[in-house]
Image (tube, rainbow, N blue to C red):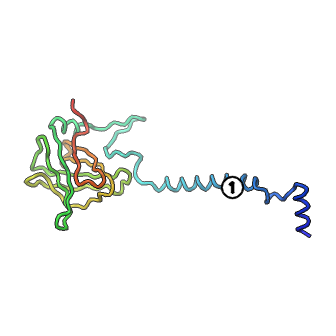
Amino acid sequence: MTNARDHQQEAAGSRPAWREPMVWLVAAIPAAAVVATTALLVVASRSSGSDDSVADKVQRTAQVQVADLGPDAMARSLRLSAVVRFSDARGTELVEVLPVDGGFDRQAMLSLALHHPSHAELDRTIALAPTDTGWRGEGGLDLSHDWNVLLAPVGGAWRLQGRWISGQQAAYLRPALGDE
């Protein structure tokens, strides 16, 4: 008897609300929006680090950010540039810095900071000791992605910067400030 009544209602043009596609759309679209918003908030809350992709210490005043460019100016005045390279010789992973130009203090210890472009938890620092040809330190390096590279003496008097491109064995480092 139920089937006969349903057929009569459909023939008359009135079906139950749960059989209408528009009713399902009216309920499904807001439900999908709530699910998508929740997923977006979960992903955003799991991201690590700050909003800045630059590793410099920055002083913030209102919406103005001020960074100390003194080390970059010092590197430019000393005309410093270097090449950093990675080698996996005889099972020992080494990072080596070779001076290209400028008045480096060849006895100073250097610090090589490697910053992942988007994942701060992968950032690392390698201490480099002086050698006959430059500076060398032990440490593995994942070359499957790019790195932002910062080279400075332990005191931070100057700094050189560069980008280590994925898959390459070396990167060129120079002052962030161009020629005057």
Furthest-bottom residue in view? 1
161 relative to 27 in the view: left or right: left
Q: Answer with the quarter of the image where residue 39 lies.
A: bottom right
- Closest to the observer: 56 or 34? 34
Looking at the rendering, in which quadrant would you find the N terminus?
A: bottom right
Coordinates of residue 141 in the picture (x, y in percent):
27, 59
Q: Nearer the viewer, residue 78 or 92?
A: 92
Q: Position of residue 34 (x, y in %)?
A: 62, 54
Q: Amino acid at mark 1?
A: Ala
Of 33 and 172, nearer the camera is 172
Indicate the secondary structure of the residue bearing disc 1.
helix
Q: Residue at x 63, y 52 (%)?
A: 33
Q: At 87% across and 59% down in the image, what residue appears?
A: 10
- Snapshot quadrant of residue 66: top left
Query: Which image quarter holds the C terminus?
Result: top left
Q: How many numbered tags mark residues here? A: 1
Left or right: residue 27 versus residue 179 is: right
**Residue 139: x %, y % from top left:** 23, 61
For residue 124, what is the image quadrant?
bottom left
Q: Residue furthest left?
A: 132
Q: From the viewer's perspective, tell me whether residue 6 is left or right of residue 171.
A: right
User: In percent of the image, x 26 and y 49: which residue is there?
Assistant: 149
Crowdedness near tag 1: few (<14), some (14–19) or many (≥20) residues, C-alpha within 10 Å: few
Task: Name the residue carrying label 1.
Answer: 28
> Where in the figure is residue 91, as x and y percent of width and height?
19, 68
Q: For this view, does 169 lie left or right of residue 38?
A: left
Q: Residue furthest top?
A: 180
Q: Is residue 62 above or below residue 142?
A: above
